[in-house]
Amino acid sequence: MSAVIDFFRSNKGAVVSLAGAVGVLVLAFSMQGCNLGDMMTHRVPKEMRSYTDGEDYVSLNESPFVLEEYMADAQRNIDQYVDANEKSALLFDFINSAVTVGIEEVGNAPIPGATVISGLLLGFAGLMIKKPGTAGAVAKEKMESFNKGQDVALEQFRDMVSPDKLREIVSTLKEGIKE
């Protein structure tokens, strides 16, 4: 053992080299399970942070998935916008042609002021047209109103009829059925 210690004392360069080699081995073994793509990160724009759960930085390995999700969501939004725009354009064309034909016909009418009257009537009709999505809101309000009325009626029924009175009514009905 003393021979080894004497060797290291006399060869300090060998000791430094050996320590460096051991350090490199330890570092290599510890880094073996690491992935450099997980260690390298980059900043995410504010508009895309909802796709990273609010994180400011994302690793290089996760980056393609975040971008893919962002692009898919953007494409869905574009498709929905284009679809809604096309539907609105069709409705506009239909209403515009109907109004144009109506105004042309009224303009040829012998009644003075018919154009003004028809404009007022068309404006009033436009106020009566339901907006898109109104049916769902009305249905929801009706359902909430129905449920509220049902709850009030049930409470009033419970106040009017006690459990003992209800049992008596049920037994009377059962006896009437048996007879």
Image: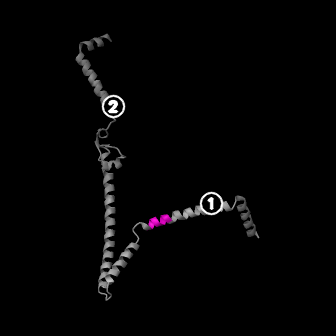
Residue 37 position, x and y percent, is: 29, 40
Q: Quadrant of the C terminus?
A: bottom right
Residue 92 position, x and y percent, is: 32, 72
Q: Which residues are magenta?
A: 135-141
Secondary structure type for disc 2: helix
Instruction: Judge depth for marks 1 and 2 and give the one in front.
Output: 1
**Measured along the vertical axis of the image, is residue 83 above or below residue 55?**
below
Q: Quadrant of the N terminus?
A: top left
Residue 140 colored magenta? yes
Secondary structure type for disc 1: helix
State how far apart marks 1 and 2 are (Cα).
70 Å
Residue at 33% across, 59% down: 77
Mark 2: which amino acid?
Answer: Ser
Closer-to-camera residue (157/2): 157
Closer-to-camera residue (176/144): 144
Mark 1: which amino acid?
Answer: Glu
Query: Which of the two discs, 1 and 2, labels the residue nearer the N terminus?
Result: 2
| Left or right of residue 138: residue 15 | left
Residue 11 colored magenta? no
**Measured along the vertical axis of the image, is residue 70 above or below residue 89?**
above
Residue at 43% across, 67% down: 134
User: Splitting the image into 4 quarters, where does residue 88 fall?
Assistant: bottom left
Q: Which residue is mark 2?
A: 30
| Left or right of residue 159: residue 146 | left
